[in-house]
Image (tube, rainbow, N blue to C red):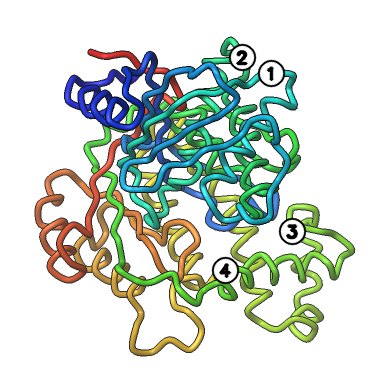
Amino acid sequence: MPLLTPQKKAALDAGFAAAYGAAPTRYFSAPGRTEIGGNHTDHQHGRVLAAAVDLDTLAAVRPNGTSTLRLLSEGYAPLEIDLRDLSPRPEERNTTASLLRGVAAGFAGLGCQVEGFDAYVTSTVLPGSGLSSSAALEVLLGTVMNGLFYGGQASPVLIAKLGQQAENLYFGKPCGLMDQMASAVGGLVAMDFEDPADPRVEKVAFDFASAHHALCILDSQASHADLTEEYAAVPGEMCQIASYFGREVLRQVPQETFQEAVPALRKAFGDRAVLRAVHFYRENRLVTRETEALARGDFDAFLSLVRKSGESSFMYLQNVIPSGAVRRQEMAVSLALCHELLEDRGAFRVHGGGFAGTVQAFVPEELLPKFRRETERVLGAGACHVLSIREAGGVEVTAE
């Protein structure tokens, strides 16, 4: 279990006291996550390999004896939620308030009597970094309510599901379950969403520190603005291919059946949709092989598979360069930097949704100083974030 350093505790206590005029009674933490393998597979009920990272969202909390949930997140306006009405509110869509209400509603649906509490929240999970700051907050809220009002009965998997439910029904984003699951469970986690209502979740035992590679997330400095259609087209085109066979998602279509129909599919939906389906089947296999390589301690094989995953995302999934972009290709530049600096060592790939955002790289420790210096020279100061994998998921923490 991660411990709360004296410095972090002092900062939380000071922020809580300034906001509420009292001292907190308990502290909770939920990590960000990184997608290791399974780029754009979860929405097709595929396999994903993910990991919790050592950036987290922290909360200092205290029950307040009312029916009001009050939250102040450092750097943001304070929020209040009346727990007597937990129905979705259209005016709260796409806001943090919707997540508070949605997670509380999820616990209420379990028969849990959620009561009012005050919370002061800080976070090192970088917004827009592909490390899923929203999922970390959802898991944090679920962990708080589980600890304060449900006796710790909710499993990490259930907390993840309640977070996804809040994001889907209250926030208004039709996300998969991967982000919340990785944050809630912690460590390296292999997930299979063939049955999304009951995904298979398995922690992978691997000592990442023994591999002597740094896990780096590169901020490409690209903007996510005006990319909604690009993101929507990826699952949309995959589902078009599935619909040809009378199915909802590609996981329900055997690969051999898909391959036999490629000529007809090209005519019906075009080549990009077909290539994105090719990526799904390929990536789904790679996740299984990556998981197996880590389980047997073969890190070199794992790195080779990560490189193949990155190649598939660039060539077949095509989520690196937005359609028609010529002058601005930040993600491709970031990948090219990794290629030049690492050559045949380590591994790198587009991270998360793509088109903008981040690149993931596994960098040999001896190459890290040069890698960080050169990537930040091109991409900007602070663009290279060096992370570690965190074994704990959403947890209550105590002071050192």
CB of mark 3 within 8 Å of CB of mark 4? Answer: no
Exactly how many numbered labels are in the figure? 4
Reading the image, the residue beneath label 1 is 112
Left or right relative to 381: residue 124: right
CB of mark 3 within 8 Å of CB of mark 2? Answer: no
Left or right relative to 197: residue 186: left
Regarding mark 3 in the picture, which secondary structure is present there? Answer: helix
User: Would you place residue 351 above or below residue 83 in this image?
Assistant: below
Mark nearest the camera among 1 and 4 is 1
Which quadrant would the C terminus be assigned to in this image? top left
Regarding mark 1 in the picture, which secondary structure is present there? Answer: loop
Reading the image, the residue beneath label 4 is 231
**Residue 294 location, quadrant:** top left
Residue at coordinates 65% horizontally, 58% vertically from top-left? 281
Distance Cα–Cα, label 3 vs label 2: 38 Å
Q: Earlier in the sequence, mark 1 or mark 4?
A: 1
Q: Earlier in the sequence, mark 3 or mark 4?
A: 4
